[in-house]
Image (cartoon, grey):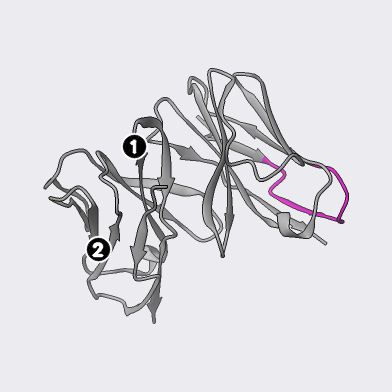
Amino acid sequence: DAGVIQSPRHEVTEMGQEVTLRCKPISGHDYLFWYRQTMMRGLELLIYFNNNVPIDDSGMPEDRFSAKMPNASFSTLKIQPSEPRDSAVYFCASSSGPETQYFGPGTRLLVL
Amino acid sequence: GQQLNQSPQSMFIQEGEDVSMNCTSSSIFNTWLWYKQDPGEGPVLLIALYKAGELTSNGRLTAQFGITRKDSFLNISASIPSDVGIYFCAGPIFNRDDKIIFGKGTRLHILP
């Protein structure tokens, strides 16, 4: 298996633009997690899905952030409009149970 | 809410030295997880601990589940350059076995 796939790996955009991050989980995994990592706040869970259904989005910072999982093999995290404070590394992880999460390589987002 | 406190925040050691780091919480955890994040990559699970007092090894890594269930320790023996990275402790939130929280990490640097 190729592991968790994220795209793009790097994104540079201007404040106010829409940003869409994509994730393909490992086949057969029924949990999918979105995290954000910054130096100040560490690794924060934004939202997670079980069997394509959002279970807990309490970590989503504000309404500018939204996530979808239309099917078992694809999820998106969207930021609209983006702001400089959204600059971070965004990770997607998948698992068949919550503990052994397999992380993707991350998307490094820079909002100017 | 539940938090995990890791110490030290960073370490600078010589190759070949042993490393010790720990993770504490004011709350009881039923599972302790240790992840490692290589530079530019996502975290990878190293060791999982499920029982108070449990001592588990993975090569040169040894982790212990504290008796009080409020702490855990990770030791690395005879460090090598590829041990560089960030080490995270993590555990499931109380009564929410499907959601884990991460500590802020211990950054390990190895001096040439």
| Position in image of residue A63 (x %, y %) | 74, 39
The residue at the point 50 percent across, 29 percent down is: A1
> Which of the numbered marks, if any, corresponds to residue B73?
none
Q: At x 31% / y 76%, what residue is drawn?
A: B15
| Whether residue A25 is situated above or below residue B53 in the rendered picture | above
Q: Quadrant of residue B10?
A: bottom left
Q: Nearer the viewer, mark 2 or mark 1?
A: 1
Decide if residue A52 is on the left or right side of residue B56.
right
Q: Is residue A91 magenta?
A: no
Q: Is residue A102 left or right of residue B67?
A: right
**Residues indicated by labels 2 and 1 sit on the same polypeptide chain:** yes
Horizontally, is B89 left or right of B71 in the view? right
Q: Which amino acid, mark 1?
A: Phe
Q: Give the CA separation, mark 2 to mark 1.
A: 29 Å
The residue where tag 1 is placed is B94
Q: Which of the marked residues, 2 or 1, is nearer the chain's N terminus? A: 2
| Residue A13 highlighted magenta (yes or no) | yes
Residue A96: which quarter of the image? top left
Does residue B72 appear left or right of residue A44 in this picture?
left
- Report the magenta residues as a range: A7-19
Q: Is there CB contact under 8 Å for labels 2 and 1?
A: no
Quarter of the image with the C terminus of chain B in it = bottom left
Q: Which residue is mark 2?
A: B76
Q: Chain of mark 1?
A: B
Please state the chain letter of the residue tagged with numbered disc 2 in the rendered image.
B
Q: Amino acid at mark 2?
A: Ile
Q: Nearer the viewer, residue A9 or B90?
A: B90
Q: Residue A59 location, x and y as percent?
A: 58, 41
Residue A41 in picture, x, y percent from top left: 55, 59
Residue toward you, A30 or A57: A57
Label 1 sits on a secondary structure element that is loop
